[in-house]
Structures are given as structure tokens and as C-alpha cells.
Amino acid sequence: MSATMLQLAECLLALPGAKHLPHTDKDPISNLPTLPEAQVSDSSIPIIDLEALHGPRRSDIVKQLGQACQHKGFFAVKNHGIPRTTVSNIFDTTREFFHLPKEERMKFYTPDPNSDIRLMNAYKDEVANVFVARESLKFHCHPVENYVNKWPTNPPSFRKYAAEYLTNVRRVEITLLGAISESLGLERDYIEKKLGGHYVSLNYYGACEQSDLELTYGVRAHTDPTIITILLQDDVPGLQVLSEGEWMDVNPIPGTVVVHVGDLLQAISNHKFKSLLHQAMVNCEKERMSIASYCYPSSDAMIGPPKKLIDNDHPAVYQDFTFKEFSEQMWKVITFTDTRLDSFKCSTA
């Protein structure tokens, strides 16, 4: 695998159980959409009231959530119940970690994609002539007690504050997956029964610097190989999504998290829900941080669409496959988009 392909594979390294297999396709970067000027369309961001899921309006909220997954591929969640102090603390400790001397941060660098914790550095792509500016610390986090002793002890607050946030975000995840299952007409615990562990990425984007590169990205356009991704943003804009054929800024909305439809939910929904193509841009005046929580199934979980979603008018788009088979295929054909699922499509799809 070339150096460039190793860097292109960076977004896949968060996949639990990923194996280092030889790739079989070409560098896919030229197939990604170019970066036009994004539309500022905050008014079109669906906002889901999580608290209302526990009251008499549940059926209405479930319907709203399903429509957001189907037509947008993402939504913001308010009244999620994660305390403001917990959010403030996780950003403070993330900032402190990435402001540590480089030699201290590099203690967590490893080329092993199967490591329980791994630092990913910013890098220059010599082929595409872009600089990908994100530095991130990725680690397993569920159950917390199984992994907390592998997390950083510098800053001293890291383990405590990360555990508090990740325990809260897991609760949000379970609540959302129940509503998403219902929106598809499935049992509330249908997707929850498939869950395995949980993975998180603490992301740091330094203020961009002058360079001779054509573009400086935070993260280039990609979909997530997840069921859902829950993203906590600080107050610095940077997230962009492809919505209805146009790039759209998803500026931070105080008190919310952003939820993305991932490739695996696209498969479970029989392509009713579309995996979200998104990217992150850097800010040339301010540093930016985000916390991405990735929701994955267990390795033996069956991912194909349930029979309840298949009929004459809605034939199966995907065959049944396990998460293990999916993760292995990702390392055979490396791509940044939902074309990871192509090898699992039914022959008639």
C-alpha cells in the first residue's frame, strides 16, 4: 500500500477489528466531489427534541427523525440531557491534550490499526496536493471500565471527563437507535440488539497556516462506516454536508449534537436512509475541536435489511452480511464513500 493510500485509509482505522489487507482499487480521491462554495442553510437543519421522545409526542418525533434520515441523512439533537459542564469539561481536556508537547502526544502514536487507542497526525497528501489538518486521538470506550485504564493520564482530568461524556453519549445513542428502529417500522430494540462496542475520536484542527498547497482540509469528503455517528462541535464552524446536491454549512447550534446516518444504517434500512457525505474545513483564525462517537455492531451481527422492509415494491437492495465481512471488505477495496457497500448489493439491485 502506498503512502498516499495509507493516509486515505485513515478514516477507516477507527473500524474495530479492521485487518491490514492489501487493497485492490485505485486511489479514490479523484472521484470525490470538488469543493464549491458551501451554502449557509442553518434553517434547513432538522432539529430533533430528544426529551420529547419520552412523552406523548413520541410518535411525532419518531416520524420527524425518520424523515430527517431519509431526506437529509443527518439531524441535530436538542434536549439530549448531556450536562453543559460535561460538554465543557470534555472540550477543556481535549484542548489540554492537544496543547501538550508533541513528544507527550506521540506516546499514543502507533501504525497498528487494531490498537485500542491511537493518535492520528495531520499530513500532506503529495499526490492530491492538499494538507489534511486534523489531528485526532481515537480509542475504544465501551464498556468504559474495560478501556479507561488505557486512556491518557495527562492531562490528569482526561479519564474522568472522557468517561463522563462517553457514558452520557452512549445513553443518547441507545435512545436514538430505538427511535430510528421505530421509524422504520421495526421493534424498538431491533438495532440495539446488534450493537457491539463504541469508538470515539477527539478531533483537533489548528488554525490553518499559509502554504503552497491548493487546499487545506480538516477532513476530506467521506461517509462513515457506522450505524450512526454522534458529533459534538465546539463553537467554531467547520462541518459541511452534501445535502440535495449542494454543500451546506452545518454551523454549531448551542446545546445540540449532530447525528449522521452511516453506511450500515443505509444497509439496514434497505437504502431508505442514505449515508451522509460530509467533510470538515479548517478555520484560519481559530482552532476547532469536535468529538465524534461511532456506533458499531458486534462482529457477528447481521446487517442486511430485515424481511419486514422487503416486498414486491421494495425489493432487497443488499444481501445479508456480517459486520466482520464488511470490515474485511473495506480493507480490500478502500474508498471514502458508501460504495463500500457495493459488493453486498443483490444482483437484482
Image (spheres, grey):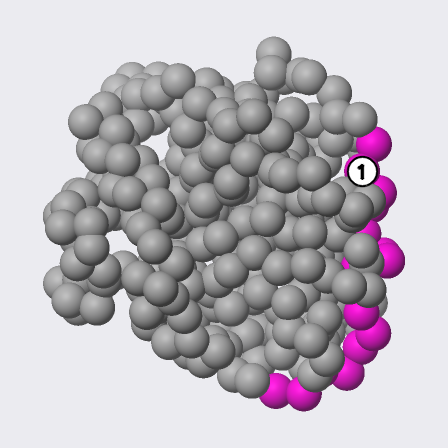
Give residue 279's position: percent from left, percent from top.
64, 42
Q: In the rendered structure, which segment of residues is drawn in magenta?
A: 21-36
Amino acid type for the residue under numbered disc 1: Leu
Q: Position of residue 52 (x, y in %)?
A: 31, 20
Quadrant hosting residue 208: top right
Specify few, some or many for label 1: CA neighbours under 10 Å numbering under 14, 14-19, or 20 or more. few
Residue 163 or residue 212, whichever sits in front: 212
Q: State whether the magenta stretch is mostly helix, strand or loop.
A: loop
Labels in figure, total? 1
Front position in the image: 337 or 101:
101
Relative to 236, 32 lies left or right: right
Q: Quadrant of residue 235?
A: top left
Residue in front for this viewpoint, 270 or 110: 110
Query: Per the image, is 163 magenta?
Result: no
Residue 322 image offset from top left, x and y in percent: 51, 75
Q: Nearer the viewer, residue 16 or 213?
A: 213
Asked whether the viewer can see residue 37, the reply is yes
Q: Quadrant of residue 45?
A: top right
Check the image and report above or below for 35 versus 17.
above
Quadrant housing the N terminus: bottom right
Instruction: Say whether residue 24 is magenta.
Output: yes
Residue shown at the point (15%, 46%) measured from the top left: 157
Left or right of residue 329: residue 19:
left
x 55%, y 74%: residue:
327
Judging by the rendered image, the residue that carries numbered circle 1 is 35
Q: Give the answer, above or below, for where 261 lies relative to 27.
A: above
Where residue 339 appears, as percent x and y from the top left, is: 74, 62
